[in-house]
Amino acid sequence: MKRYLLILAALMTVSTTTAAARNPRKTTRTARLEAAERTADSLRAVTARQAALIDSLQNLAAALDDELYTEESVTPQIDTRTPEEIAADSVADMRRRMERKEIHSTFETDDLAVIDTLSSGNDALYVVLFGDNSWKYVRNREVAKDSTIFEKYWDTKSLFPYSSVTKANIPESVVVTLVDSTSGFHYPYKGAVNPRGKFGLRRGRRHQGVDLPLKMRDTVYATFSGRVRISQSVRGYGNLIIIRHDNGLETYYGHLSERLVEPNQWVEAGEIIGLGGSTGRSTGPHLHFETRYYGQSFDPERLIDFKRGILNREVFLLKRSFLSIYSNAGQDFDDEEANEKQDKQEAAERAAMRYHKIRSGDTLGHLAVKYGTTVKKICALNGIKPTTILRIGRTLRVR
Ligand SMILES: [Zn+2]
């Protein structure tokens, strides 16, 4: 106990000594002036801090004022529509989106280099900047991945993974969104559809898509954004790419000279996916283009005006009746070739046709000899009898 008191006494001595040293009465005049200066400095610093604080509070108040004012002026109108009216309006909106209009290719990627990719504040979207200062939103596929579209019936080897879905399973009509704010369109190839290569039956032979004649190595584009399901060389189709799109549609690009995308790769509308060619069963360079839903083909000209390179509407009402009854299989390119052969034969026949204008003294016998045919054949070609009187000036087909 005695020891603690001693330590306490020692401490008291030290503190008394220190207090004596600080006592202004014991310092010189200079030291006092210096102390006053320091006090003034610290007071000035406090004043400056207070001024800054007052400034920032005033700014905050002004900002809050603005905010309140803005909020007041943009207060959303209360929706006074009845559920029936809301439903009617959304039907009207859907109808407007289904109307026929001209939607041009949203993006030309031919000469554009991607400069940078930026975040957009929304994880599901990012912003891509291009060399010409243009930009566009692109979906971040890892976030926005739709498991139902890109995982179910997903097969990167087999052309037709939908064997369990029959045409009867497909609803009477399906609303298919073709383009929206983040999903654009680009013509696959701009050119007239070969009249022989239209969709549907011709002479009983089926054609599952359209044929667009092109020059060797012309660029072919992804029509909508989506994911490449097939990129391989297939009998008949040659180099074939199949892309599945966000809306479930699939587009086919056949006879390509080169494939520039791989299975499972995400592509944007307008991305170059391959070069035109004549691989597979093809008699000349052309793009064999198909549109399918659950593997069932329908006429691509319902969606796209190929000659002008435009999309016909934003939203497409796909009716089951549009689907080909034969379409749960690939294209039979024997049919395509047979049609072409027959077309050529008919064209040759048309080119070989000969006509004769009746002059005074002409008889069917004379004409048969002159054109190396028979009276019977001339009669058959013109629907006349050997006894028919030939009127001068009448034109007969003689071959
Ligand atoms: Zn074709």
Image (cartoon, rainbow, N blue to C red):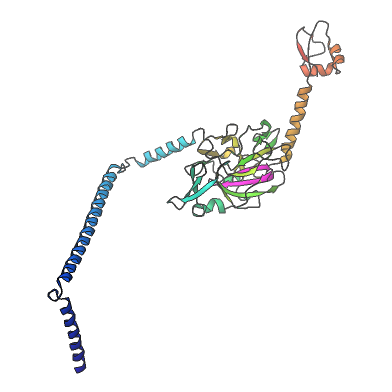
Image point (31%, 43%), residue name: 76
Please state the extent of the stretch shown in magenta in the rendering.
238-258
**Which residue is at the far bottom?**
2
Please identify the residue farthest to the left as the structure is shown: 25
Q: Main secondary structure of the magenta part?
A: strand
Residue 104: x and y, percent?
Answer: 53, 35
Q: At 72% from the left edge and 39% from the top edge, which residue is drawn?
A: 282
| Horizontal side, residue 238 vs residue 70: left or right | right
Q: Compared with residue 260, is residue 349 higher up or lower down, i.e. above or below? A: above
Q: Nearer the viewer, residue 7 or 252?
A: 7
Which quarter shows the C terminus? Answer: top right
Magenta stretch holds residue 183: no
| Residue 114 visible (yes or no) | yes
Which sits in the foreground, 115 or 96?
Answer: 115
Q: Where is residue 94 drawn, in percent x and y?
A: 45, 38
Q: What residue do we see at 84% from left, 9% from top?
A: 363
Q: Is residue 290 visible?
A: no
Vertical comparison of 372 with 128: above or below:
above
User: Where residue 1 appears, x then y in whole percent?
Assistant: 20, 93
x 26%, y 52%: residue: 60
Instruction: Establish if 88 lies above or below 56.
Output: above
The quadrant where residue 380 appears: top right
